Image (spheres, helix red, strand yellow):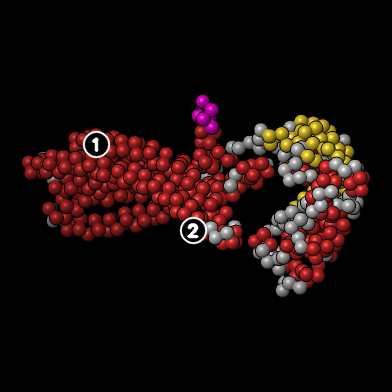
Amino acid sequence: MKRIFKLENRHKTLIGMVRENTFRLFLATCCMIVGAASQALAAYLIKHVLDDIFVNKDVEMLKWLPIAILIIFLIRGVGMYGQEFFMSYVGEGIIRRLRDMLYDKITDLPLSFFYREKTGVLMSRLTNDVNIVKNMVSNAVTGAMHDLFKIIFLTITIFYLIWQMAFFALIILPLAFYPIVIFGRRVRRVSTGWQEAMADLSSFLHETFAGNKIVKAFGMEKFEKARFFKKSGKIFHLEMKSVIAKALSSPVMETFAGFGIAFIIWYGGSQVISGYLTMGTFIAFLTAVLMLYEPVKKLSKLNNSLQEGLAATDRIFDLIEMESDIKEIADPEELVTHPHRVTFNNVFFKYDSEMVLKDISLDVQVGEVLALAGMSGGGKSSLVNLIPRFYDVSGGSIQIDGIDIKNASISSLRKQIAIVTQEPILFNDSVRNNIAYGKLEASDKKIEEAARAAYAYDFIMGFPKQFDTNIGELGSRLSGGEKQRICIARALFKNAPILILDEATSSLDAESEMLVQKALENLMKGRTTFVIAHRLSTIGYADRIVVIVDGCIVEQGGHDELLSIRGEYHKLYQMQLGNGN
């Protein structure tokens, strides 16, 4: 029942998109009718060509029939062009809407979704699956409508010419449609598997191309090639299953059509010989029947495209209809940008089935620098990811100035927070647009001020186009220290009152770390700051250090104070110094 309800909603969505193009569809339909009627009329005129010109030797008809046929084919050409243009416009418009809806939904889904899904799979949904739907809308639906009008007009023609034989010709048609239904179901099943396999292959390619340095460093080229060949072989196997289903439908239909045409030739020929029918009438009828079977045969191929498109549509709507875990209340509060106090009240957080944080209570004052220390996997990153609601707490609450963040609008909440991560995240754009990300209309002066405060101005001015220099995919044209300072400049530019530094210097060399630390000191001034520290030697400046072990706070205090009690912090510190005492 739930599945039927979902399908109804999906159909309503697609129908709604189609209705937005009612006028263009009307014009396309008119063009299809003109095209189909002109083809049926051309078949009918064969009767007069044979009977009036070749048999009766009517000179007057010889003058007018060629002109009539020329006009008919000209009208048919105009109809075909109009049909193609208007239906393609509608089809491309629907595809654009679907693609936009898909990207809009994916972008709004919570961080947990991106950790679960593979990047290549999502890319495949936006490209491969959408293109299959495009093929369905632009070709299958258009072709089906066009062929339907052909069938209607040609059926009228054959009934007008010889109604007795027309009945027999139409008896064959339901039998000819049988393979369309049977093989179409198989094509849809196989197509779903093929699309999933293509998504898996896209994900594999994304991983191996992005990580090619590691593949080469570990000598795993042969291994990765074998994995690719296996995935490619699976796609080939599914393709061949689809080919078999598609290829079988045509010969089965040809066989049925052969029976019908053989009977018509036998029966109609005998009628012509007996003098009951003229040769022109019979040939015109036979031509119309041959034309009639052609669109019926094409419907088989169009149905295959339709089934593939419906399978892709299901995959697209599975994402579009996905519910976000992070929900905003009906009338949320708007947080005002000023220095903030952040409070954790008995916070619990569960990821999947694992309890990651247990009964966390913290009160972080305005302008305080709070460092989070502990072994990897202890829950430090999970704790700071709860503040901008990348995830929601499983129990307890987080408050900003006494307001539960679940009662604040998500946009105003995230305006209060700037983040610098361990892995610099930059975009394939100019230095200027990366620093001003989120406020691209900013003045050059403010961008330059942020760059100076992040100790990035000097190296930026050394670039060929300075602030207009493109930094490449993920900042590939910059060094690690340069990338991190651009990220710090971005955070400075945002000027948010809450700052999260997630191991922002852990991957840098000593010289780069020194410059980045200076930039971070500028960034932290006057801000409520959460620092996740990889090297404990870098957080001596923190107002307070909180040690988290297995999701629980086990110690908190200043650097010297925590060393003096010789607990978990002391143990971590000694481990990093390489001294077990």
Residue 22 on image: x %, y %: 51, 43
In depth, the one of 67 and 414 nearer the eye is: 414
**The magenta stretch spans which residues?**
1-6
- Residue 37 lies, with reference to residue 167, above or below; the image says below
Q: Residues within 10 Å of mark 2 (few under 14, many from 20)?
A: few
Q: Earlier in the sequence, mark 1 or mark 2?
A: 1
The amino acid marked with disc number 1 is Ile
> Left or right: where does residue 222 sit relative to residue 288?
right
Does residue 4 show up magenta in the picture?
yes
Q: Which residue is mark 1?
A: 172
Residue 189 on image: x %, y %: 42, 39
In depth, the one of 258 and 544 nearer the eye is: 544
Q: Residues within 10 Å of mark 1 (few under 14, many from 20)?
A: some
Q: Is residue 221 visible?
A: yes
What residue appears at the point 77 percent right and 33 percent down from the top-left corner?
358
Asked which secondary structure carries label 1, the reply is helix
